[in-house]
Every structure is written in C-alpha cells, then in structure tokens.
Amino acid sequence: MSELSWWILAACLTAYAVKLCGYFVPRKVLDSPTMSHVAATLTIALLASLVTVNAVTSGQQLVIDARIGALGAAIIALVFKAPYLVVVIVGALAAVALRATGLAA
Amino acid sequence: MPATQAKWLTPATKMGLSIAIATGLYGISFGALSIAAGLNLWQTVALSALMFTGGSQFAFIGVISGGGAASAAFSAASLLGIRNAVYGMQIKQTLRPTAKWVPWMAQVTIDESTAVSLGQSEIAEKKRGFFTAGVGVYVLWNLFTLIGALLGERMGDPAAWGLDGAAVAAFIGLLWPRLKATEPVLIALAAAVVTAIAVPLSAPGLPILITAACAALYAMSTAKRASAATEHGELQSVKEGEGKP
C-alpha cells in the first residue's frame, strides 16, 4: 500500500474513534439536571451553527451568495408552514434561480 | 432498534429521507473531486465508506489537491471530525442506545443524523430520524461517491443543482420548530453570531465546536435558575422506555 493509503486508513480510524468517544461519556454525567439543561441549549446552538456554516461560509471566509437567498426563501416557506420536503426544495430552487438570473453568485 | 411496524413514513422519516437525498447527491461532487485530487478509486471509496463524515473528507482531498502532505490532510480531516464526538454525547443522552448498537450508531453519527434526531420532540421520532438520516445518507453518499468517481469532473459542481441551497434549507427547517419562545431565539442568534465570528479566525470545523463550548458554558451558568424539568429532562422522565420495540 502506498504512503497515502496508510494516511487515509489512519484518518478513517481516527474519525471512527472520535465518533465513538461521545458514546463513552458515562450516563450518570449525561443525566444530571445541569447536563439536561446544557443538552437542550446545545441542541439549538448546534443547529443554528450548522445553518450559519452552510449559509454564509466558504472555507475560512464569510461570503454572501445565493445561499443567503435560499435561507430567506426557506424561512418564508416555514412561516407559511410548508412541509419539510417543500422547504428543502424551495431552498434548492431559490439558489438555482438566483444564479440563473445573475442576481447572486 | 428503530420502531418498525405501523406507519414508517412519519414526519421524522420523511425529514431523514429528504436530507439523505440532498446530502447523498453531494457524494457525486466528492467522488469527482477526489479523483481530480489524485486519489485512486479505492482510496476515494474507502474515504466515504470508512471515514464517512463529509466535511472531513472534503478537507482531506482539499489538502492533497493543494499539494499538501498526507500528514497535513490527516490532521485537517481529524480536526474537522471532532464535532462528531459532541454529537455522540447528544445522541447517547436522548436515544439511550444499548451497548451492542453503539458501534454501528457511532459510524452514522454525523451532522445530518444528529440534526434530524434533535429536531424531533418524541423519543420514537428521534430514533426514526437518526436512523433514517444516518443510514440513508450512508447508502446514498457511498453510491454517489462511486458514481462521481467513475464519471469524473463532468458533473462535479453541486452549486449548479442548488444542493448548497438545499442544505441550508434542510438545517433551518430542523431549527425552526424549536424557536417558539424568546430564549431559544436569542440562543440561536447568539450561536449564529459566535459561529460567524469564529469562521475567519479558526480552522474549518472549529467554529461549530467553539459555538458548542460557548453554549455549554452559558447553559451551565444559568442551570441553577432553570428548573430541573427542562424540555429535555421532562421528555426523558416521561417518555423513557417508549419507542423500544
């Protein structure tokens, strides 16, 4: 196997070990009232962080492009109580439309 | 472990399938870019099957295609994957898996499966969401990685299909139902600001961890005035034991 293949294997094993790590935190620690409160807060923070990373970042840069339009369109769909799949499709269509019309990169 | 019988096309499984399709298609882009970066077919397929965490995979081939050393690619990918450990903690706390399931669940503990699971309010739906999104993304991501690797760069750019817009919509769609009171809205806005500030200042993958650390510190400092029966605490004490076949 080439050197690159060994590094790929090592990176794959590390990725799995890291995923497994979270499951080894003792249940007693996770079950304290403080941790329940932390978990509830963390849920919202993680989802908001994922939205931000996917909407306005590219590598280490903040960029405004068609994705911010997709976010706006998705929020409008959510305000009108559209089903989840519709929200996802609206996001995709908004990005395609903004690029096709040259309104956003 | 996922509740089987009865109707399995529930809101959670629909969300899981939607996000699996949108994310899985991205695999075409990964497969094509990986070959372009100089990896061979088996190395490309191995990354999707074994590493299976998209951000880390793109980071790995990004470093290689930029002429970086394999050790640097290893470091970038590993750093980017640390957030999956935080996801594992969250999933363990809410889904309470038995030991024999953990090795399998760990492999599909990624952004999408965690987000779909956290987006549900009932424990049975949380389980369905986690497994539908996790297994769904795994199958489609690997399938489309192979297709992308075989077809090459001809169909590489996910932006041309609006898939990046679909990803944004998928995550806001999961967050939205949780923004019904003032405090969650403020937490979400603060998290977005912290993430945006952290992006130019830290390596890719770290902003989510920095945001998680800030949120955890804030929650610990306010834990005393919050009653023990937070949404999560109550959910567990009432619903624990449900959703197991």
Image (cartoon, helix red, strand yellow):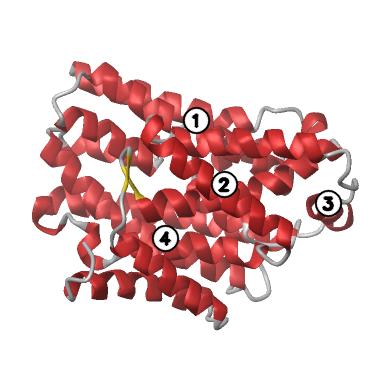
Q: Do the residues labelled 3 and 4 touch (CB within 8 Å)?
A: no
- Distance, label 2 to label 4, CA atoms, is 16 Å
- Side of B212 relative to B65 (left or right): right
Q: Disc 2 marks which residue?
A: B191
- Distance, label 1 to label 4, CA atoms, is 21 Å
- Distance, label 1 to label 2, CA atoms, is 18 Å
Mark 3 burial class by Cα count in 10 Å: few <14, some 14-19, many 20+: some
Q: Is residue A70 above or below residue A2?
A: below
Q: Which amino acid does label 4 sit on?
A: Val
Residue A48 picture location, percent across and down? 54, 52
As drawn, the label of residue B168 is 4
Q: Is residue A26 above or below residue B143?
A: above
Q: Nearer the viewer, mark 2 or mark 3?
A: 2
Residue B74 picture location, percent across and down? 32, 23
Q: Which quadrant holds residue B164?
A: bottom left
- Side of B38 relative to B48 (left or right): left
Q: Nearer the viewer, mark 1 or mark 4?
A: 4
Label 2 or label 3, whichever comes before in sequence order: 2
- Side of A43 relative to B60 (left or right): right
